[in-house]
Image (cartoon, rainbow, N blue to C red):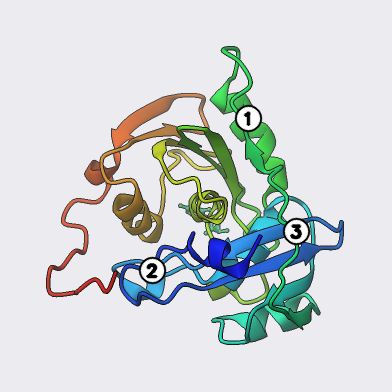
Amino acid sequence: MSWTSLLDRSYVPYSGEPKACLVEGSSGKIYAGVRIENISYPLTIPAVQAACAICLSEKDTPAKIYVQNRELEQLAFWTVEFHMKVVETDEPPVVDREDLQMNPSSTFSAIDELKSLLNQAVTTNSDFPVSALLFTENGYFEGVNVEVSDWTQGICAERVAIAKAYAHGDTEFTKMEIHTRKGEFSSPCGACRQVIVELLPYHDVVLHHADGTLSEHITVDLLPFSFKSSALNKKK
Ligand code: THU
């Protein structure tokens, strides 16, 4: 894969400046990450955070990062956190597509999948695992929450699933399903709602609660009066 084809998977309507990187886990598997902007700029998912969190969500450990140049947000933090080697190259390695899971059969049970996925959450600080399935026309992407030493650089399960889908260039979203084992009501946080409403505006969200019940919602209903502004021009 070339940098150009990976960069094209970024979602950068505000800056018009795509960013991408590839992280090699200690298993040898390669994970892509692309920049996913948000109308609320601080909620943007940087390419480095995306790739590292995807790697960690697969129970792998970031060992090496391939970049075209060093102009990437959070590169310093993640490099130090995992003692990653930074490789600047014009010829990126090939990405594995294994984490794009196809819906296997009609016997597929989202809740069974979500429950077993909780074991992949990296919850060093909170001990509060969250799992998410993001469905597209082609299959689904799995996400779990990932925590690191700096709480502000961790990422929620919902956004890891979104990061995976973008990194694979598969963004014909249909619905999202979310689960937490603890707490009364499985509910995406405000930051995730802002991201979800921008990327899946009128889609179904199924919340699987800890007591075994579920509730179904339309994404826009989860965030009334969400931040949008026609004054914020898109560059792309
Ligand atoms: N968390 C999620 O993964 N999704 C949400 O919508 C709410 C919060 C995670 C983030 C952190 O790892 C832990 O739950 C506690 O905030």
Relative to the observer, which residue lies in front, 134 or 14?
14
| Quarter of the figure that contains the N terminus | bottom right
Q: Which residue lies furthest to the left in this view?
A: 231
Tell me the mark number nearer the camera, choosing from 1 and 2: 2
Q: Distance between the residues labelled 1 and 2?
A: 31 Å
Q: Check the image and report above or below for 161 versus 102.
A: below
Residue, x 41% and y 40% (percent of image)?
173
Q: Is residue 190 left or right of residue 111?
A: left
Q: In which quarter of the image is residue 48?
A: bottom right
Three-letter amino acid code at the position of disc 2: Val
Can you give x and y, in whole percent of width and height, for residue 229 in the image? 15, 68
Q: Is residue 56 left or right of residue 33?
A: right
Three-letter amino acid code at the position of disc 1: Glu
User: Mark 1: is the Cβ under 8 angstroms from ligand 1?
Assistant: no
Q: Name the residue under label 3.
A: 30
Q: How far apart are marks 3 and 1 (CA)?
A: 23 Å
Q: Which of marks 1 and 2 is nearer the N terminus?
A: 2
Q: Name the residue under label 2.
A: 12
Q: Check the image and report above or below for 31 versus 88.
A: above
Can you give x and y, in whole percent of width and height, for residue 209 in the image? 47, 33
Relative to the observer, which residue lies in front, 91 or 168?
91
Tell me the mark number nearer the camera, choosing from 3 and 1: 3
The answer to the question of whether label 3 and label 1 lie on touching residues, with beta carbons closer than 8 A, is: no
Badge 3 marks a residue whose secondary structure is strand
Residue 2 visible: yes
Residue, x 62% and y 59% (percent of image)?
126
Q: Which residue lies furthest to the right in this view?
A: 27
User: Mark 3: is the Cβ under 8 angstroms from ligand 1?
Assistant: no
Few, some or many residues within 10 Å of mark 1 (<14, 14–19, 20+): some
Q: Earlier in the sequence, mark 3 or mark 1?
A: 3
Q: In which quarter of the image is residue 125?
A: bottom right
Q: Mark 1 points at which residue?
A: 113
